[in-house]
Amino acid sequence: LTAEKCDLFAGEWVPDPSGPNYTNRSCLHIQEHQNCMRNGRPDSGYLYWRWKPSGCDLPKFNPRKFLKLMRNKSLAFIGDSISRNHVQSLLCILSQVNQQVQLPELVFLLFNRQTQ
């Protein structure tokens, strides 16, 4: 990627015949209420699209490379339920190469803590 000509915020959705990094069957981190297919969504065509930014190609996420780069490092997600969805998605992708990738429920409990 070159920052000069790559605009991540402008682009288009393009067909991706390789399909998704994970599905509701291959990831245990998808919660019941978020499981579109198990909850009756009849189509699966939406799984075969990817975002193509203007002026560049994004390489497909490489979970092995990510785990290697993040070994002995920390990563924090701060935010709301959207951030939680990002964490769950990352866990789903990483669990495809390492089934031991887990996130203790305690983190989600702290994540959802509200001040009174």
Image: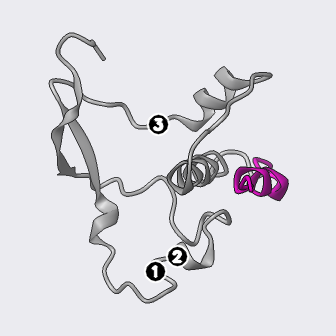
Residue 33 sits in quarter? bottom right
Assess disc 1: are there few (<14), some (14-19) or many (≥20) residues with their C-alpha within 10 Å of its C-alpha: few
77 sits to left or right of 54? right
Q: Is residue 105 magenta?
A: yes
Query: Residue placed at 55% from the left, 48% from the top?
Result: 83
Q: Secondary structure at mark 1?
A: loop
Which label was assigned to residue 61? 3
Of the 4 image quadrants, the one containing the N terminus is: top left
Q: Nearer the viewer, mark 3 or mark 2?
A: 2
Q: Secondary structure at mark 3?
A: loop
The numbered mark, 3 or 2, whose residue comes first in the sequence reads 2
Disc 3 to disc 2, C-alpha distance: 22 Å
| Residue marked by disc 2 | 35
Count of marks overlaid on the render = 3
Q: Position of residue 97 (x, y in %)?
A: 66, 45
Q: Position of residue 39 (x, y in %)?
A: 49, 87
Disc 2 to disc 1, C-alpha distance: 6 Å
Query: Residue placed at 15% from the left, 24% from the top?
Result: 55
Circle 3: residue type: Phe
| Residue marked by disc 1 | 37
Circle 1: residue type: Met
Circle 2: residue type: Asn
Q: Position of residue 42 (x, y in %)?
A: 34, 86
Assess disc 3: are there few (<14), some (14-19) or many (≥20) residues with their C-alpha within 10 Å of its C-alpha: few
43 sits to left or right of 80? left
Q: Secondary structure at mark 2?
A: loop
Which label was assigned to residue 105? none
Residue range highlighted in magenta = 100-116
Q: Is residue 65 magenta?
A: no
